[in-house]
Amino acid sequence: MSPIIKLHKGDLPANVTFTGSVAIDTETLGLNPNRDRLCLVQLSAGDGNAHLVQFDGKDYSSPRLKALLTDPAVLKIFHFARFDVAVLHKYLGVVTQPVYCTKIASKLVRTYTDRHGLKDLANELLGVEMNKQQQSSDWGAVTLTDQQRHYAASDVLHLHAMKARLDMMLDREGRRAFAEAAFGFLPTRAALDLAGFPDDDIFSH
């Protein structure tokens, strides 16, 4: 069954709510949060459907989305949360918490490989083949293509299932505490990126 993908302009509608956890991803005009603006935020409850919030580059008020991002009762699941948390902080002005990052979890338990991309995780853990063809398209376009919408949705549709598998592996290897400590540090790591410390290991000699 094809996912239901709903596009919203500027904010989530009042009738769209999330409880417990929500999978989130972002699309920007590049990989530098201080230069490349936030264009799209994708969200999924893990039910096979997705909501896309599109921004015009001028209005980032989005009160309902901001409330969700800062709701302590809702876990926000990302893949490579470091970037998403930074860009959400830059453009929406909020610190996203609490956070779970499937890439960090993967690096802690899938030590038998150096392939920790979303496509690799989907393939190995879930047997899902993801098409990343639209990754470098123009997300600032006024009208998104159907291909862009489906690509954006695919980035959040499987995160809940990935988390479930990675949680089992974290518990099996006794590394859950490491993961939770790393997740807790993510907003600070994102703030350091925005402050101009993207490549510095602040713990090094």
Image (spheres, rainbow, N blue to C red):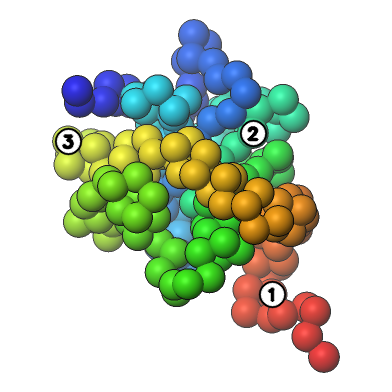
Q: CA distance from mark 3 to mark 2?
A: 29 Å
Which residue is label 2 attached to? 75
Which residue is label 3 attached to? 146
Q: Nearer the viewer, residue 154 or 35?
A: 154
- Do callouts 3 and 2 mark residues in contact (Cβ within 8 Å)? no
Q: Determine the image quadrant of residue 98.
A: top right
In the image, taking residue 172 as reference, residue 48 lies left or right, namely left
Amino acid under disc 3: Asp
How many residues crowd around disc 2 within 10 Å: few (fewer than 14), some, or many (20 or more)? many
Q: Determine the image quadrant of residue 124.
A: bottom left
> Where does the image place residue 55, in percent across and percent down from the top left?
42, 37
Q: Nearer the viewer, residue 99 or 189?
A: 99
Task: Say which element carries label 1.
Answer: loop
| The C terminus: image quadrant | bottom right
Count of number-bearing discs:
3
Is residue 143 positioned above or below 139 on the image? above
Which residue is label 1 attached to? 197
Give the residue displayed 51% in from the left and 64% down from the top.
110
How many residues crowd around disc 3 within 10 Å: few (fewer than 14), some, or many (20 or more)? few
